[in-house]
Amino acid sequence: MASRMLLVGWDAADWAILQPLMETGEMPALRGIVEAGVSGQLLSTRPLLPVAQWTTLATGKRPWQHRVCHLIERFTEANEPVPVTAAQRRALALWEVLAQAGKRSLVVGWPATHGGHTETPFSCRTVTPNPPRRRELSRGRPRRPGRIGQRKSAPG
């Protein structure tokens, strides 16, 4: 058994685009990772929401089993959205299973990972950005956040 594992998930990546780029040498790092390991295309789950699909990948369970089916868990009394957390999940994620076996994990940029089932000193979970507010959803498209340090210029 390998002593280390790297699991990379790339949302909306398309092998039809990536393969030619790797073959022509335009993506040598990705080519090296793919050649040294295992790769493949995953089938989508329903609902077609990234948070549900990433949780399915992390748990090996379908959305109706792990219970993470939407980005927003609930709304507060002030009608503010509350993002879904790992506490909503009804199945252990890969890094939690590994932690129970005494293995260390580093999880970066995975949706709905904060507030997990097992808090161990070996796991590092990152929180993805908050979902758009309800008033932004009602306009059709959420506003895009500005860059860090970007300031609005004063008129005139």
Image: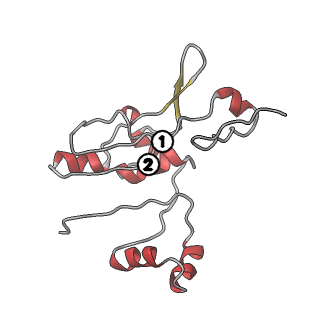
Q: Depth check: 69 or 109 in front?
A: 109
Assess whether mark 1 and mark 2 are in contact (beta carbons under 8 angstroms): yes
Instruction: State the SS at label 2.
Output: loop
Tell me the amino acid under the disc marked 1.
Thr
Please provide percent x and percent y for residue 138.
73, 31
**Looking at the image, which residue is at 50% across and 61% down?**
43
Outermost residue, left side: 102
The image quadrant where one finds the C terminus is top right
Dividing the picture into quarters, in which one does residue 2 lie?
bottom left
Please provide percent x and percent y for residue 24.
55, 86
Outermost residue, front side: 156
Q: Which numbered disc covers residue 83?
A: none
Q: Which numbered disc covers residue 128?
A: 1
Dividing the picture into quarters, in which one does residue 144 lie?
top right
**Looking at the image, which residue is at 39% across and 50% down?**
108
Packing grade of label 2 (10 A; few <14, some 14-19, many >=20) is: few
Compared across the picture, whether 142 is left or right of 156 comes to: left
Packing grade of label 1 (10 A; few <14, some 14-19, many >=20) is: some
Instruction: State the SS at label 1.
Output: loop
Tell me the amino acid under the disc marked 2.
Gly
Please provide percent x and percent y for residue 1.
17, 69
**Looking at the image, which residue is at 30% across and 43% down?**
92
In the rendered view, tell whether residue 39 sits above or below residue 70: below
Compared across the picture, whether 141 is left or right of 90 comes to: right
Q: How far separated are the C-alphas under marks 2 and 1?
A: 6 Å
Please provide percent x and percent y for residue 12.
57, 60
Outermost residue, top side: 77
Give the labeled residue for mark 2. Answer: 109
The total of numbered circles placed on residues is 2
Dividing the picture into quarters, in which one does residue 34 lie?
bottom left
**Looking at the image, which residue is at 72% across and 40% down?**
141
